[in-house]
Image: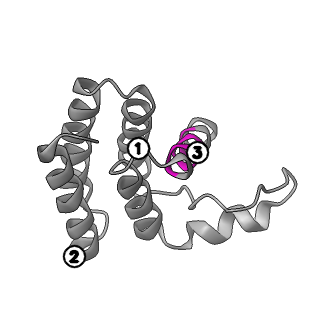
């Protein structure tokens, strides 16, 4: 994202996750605010991922989506999907940090994987 306020908010979210973990009330408000910046910058992928993320956290009181693997995983492979879910804070921190640099193709790809995983959950 280009907006300086959005970058500051991303940094705040990452610091808060380190300090308090997934504190649902504050975290959801910050994600909603970050989503408004993504709307202003017209980045539909980020808008959608952030909405899915805070809705997921509201429903589950946690973030149960694992960090996307570097290699594609086979559909039968349940084990690899669950291993990344062991640390919801790390996965959420990774997702939020992806929104910082959207010129990176890998970040866009991982955001799409998060979007798909959140839709399937």
Q: Determine which residue is flagged by label 1.
A: 102
- Could you tell me what secondary structure mostly forms the magenta stretch? helix
Q: Is residue 64 above or below residue 21?
A: above
Q: What element carries label 3?
A: helix
Name which quarter of the figure residue 69 lies in.
bottom right
Looking at the rendering, the stretch of residues picked out in magenta corresponds to 107-115
Residue 103: percent from left, percent from top: 43, 44
Name which quarter of the figure residue 82 lies in.
bottom right
Please tell me how crowded label 2 is: few (under 14), some (14-19), or many (20+) other residues with Cα within 10 Å: few
Please tell me how crowded label 1 is: few (under 14), some (14-19), or many (20+) other residues with Cα within 10 Å: some
Q: Which is more N-terminal, label 2 or label 1? A: 2
Inspect this view and state whether residue 61 appears. no
The residue that appears at 21% across and 61% down in the rendered structure is 11
Identify the image quadrant of the C terminus. top right
Inspect this view and state whether residue 91 appears. yes
Q: Determine which residue is flagged by label 2.
A: 19
Q: Determine which residue is flagged by label 3.
A: 109
- Magenta-span inclusion, residue 118: no
Q: Closer to the camera, 39 or 90?
A: 39
Identify the image quadrant of the N terminus. top left
Q: Which of marks 3 and 2 is in front?
A: 3
Q: Residue furthest front?
A: 103
Q: Is residue 47 left or right of residue 64?
A: left
Q: Nearer the viewer, mark 1 or mark 2?
A: 1
Q: Closer to the camera, 2 or 18?
A: 2
């Amino acid at each position: 994202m280009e907006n300086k306020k959005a970058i500051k908010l991303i940094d705040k979210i990452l610091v808060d996750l380190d300090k308090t973990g997934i504190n649902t009330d504050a975290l959801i408000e910050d994600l909603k605010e970050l989503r408004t910046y993504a709307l202003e910058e017209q980045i539909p992928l980020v808008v959608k991922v952030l909405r899915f993320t805070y809705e997921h956290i509201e429903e589950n009181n946690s973030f149960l989506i694992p960090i996307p693997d570097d290699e594609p995983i086979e559909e039968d492979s349940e084990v690899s999907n669950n291993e990344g879910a062991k640390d919801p804070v790390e996965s959420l921190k990774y997702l939020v940090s992806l929104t910082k640099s959207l010129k990176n193709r890998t970040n866009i790809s991982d955001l799409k994987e998060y979007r798909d995983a959140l839709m399937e959950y």
